[in-house]
Amino acid sequence: MLEKHLANWAEWSRILRGALHVRRSLLYLAIASLIVLIVHRTRVISVPSKAIPVAEVSGKNWHYDLSFPVYNSSTLERLIQCESQGRNISRTDSNGQMSWGILQFNGTSTWNEMEQRFNFYGDPRNPPDAIHMADMMISRGLIGRWACARSLGLTK
């Protein structure tokens, strides 16, 4: 009986050693395959450092490249030139309230109201956000919210 158990143990031992050799061989094969794939498949892809602009808005001594379409660029350019000369500034407006950015949005009334109306949330001090918001407002007939629009004759 002991001899039978020893024979069985020896048989299982050979089988297990063979299985370990197969697993080790498969592991080496997988590693070698990965190395071949990495070495032969690696390609250098150049990615531009900046996104290609979709639109631009510019004036005298200022320029903004934008990653979204602008539908009222000439009106926006005139409005920005009048409101801030393209500079991102904050100052107290004629009504005593603080206005921000290149389009001089009043953050506590106009900007907050338009965020709700257009479901667009951003910062009036961020030129692309301000341009996007103003473009939506102009497209919806709200250009009269800017005093400069009236002085430039942009309102009806």
Image (cartoon, rainbow, N blue to C red):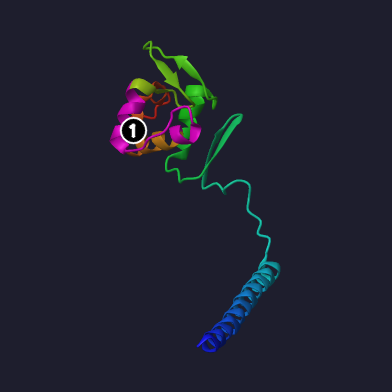
Is residue 62 found left or right of 95 in the rendered image? right
Outermost residue to the front:
1
Up the image or down, 77 lies above or below 36; here it is above
The residue that label 1 is drawn on is: 115
Outermost residue to the right:
39
Q: Residue 153 or 45: which is nearer the viewer? A: 45
Q: Position of residue 142 (x, y in %)?
A: 32, 31
Up the image or down, 35 lies above or below 122; here it is below
- Is residue 118 part of the magenta span, yes or no? yes
Identity of the residue drawn at 36% across and 35% down: 138
Q: Position of residue 101 (x, y in %)?
A: 48, 25
Region of the chain picked out in magenta, as a range? 109-130
Outermost residue to the left:
117
Identity of the residue drawn at 47% across and 27% down: 125
Amino acid on which the number 1 mark rests in the picture? Glu
Res. 19 image quadrant: bottom right
Q: Residue 7 or 122: which is nearer the viewer? A: 7
Quadrant placement of the C terminus? top left
Q: Position of residue 137 (x, y in %)?
A: 35, 35
Mostly what secondary structure, the magenta segment? helix
Up the image or down, 49 lies above or below 120; here it is below
Q: Position of residue 130 (x, y in %)?
A: 44, 32
As helix, strand or loop, the secondary structure at mark 1 comes to helix
- Is residue 53 part of the magenta span, yes or no? no
Callout 1 crowding tier (Cα within 10 Å): few <14, some 14–19, many ≥20? some
Up the image or down, 135 lies above or below 96; here it is below
Identity of the residue drawn at 67% across and 67% down: 38
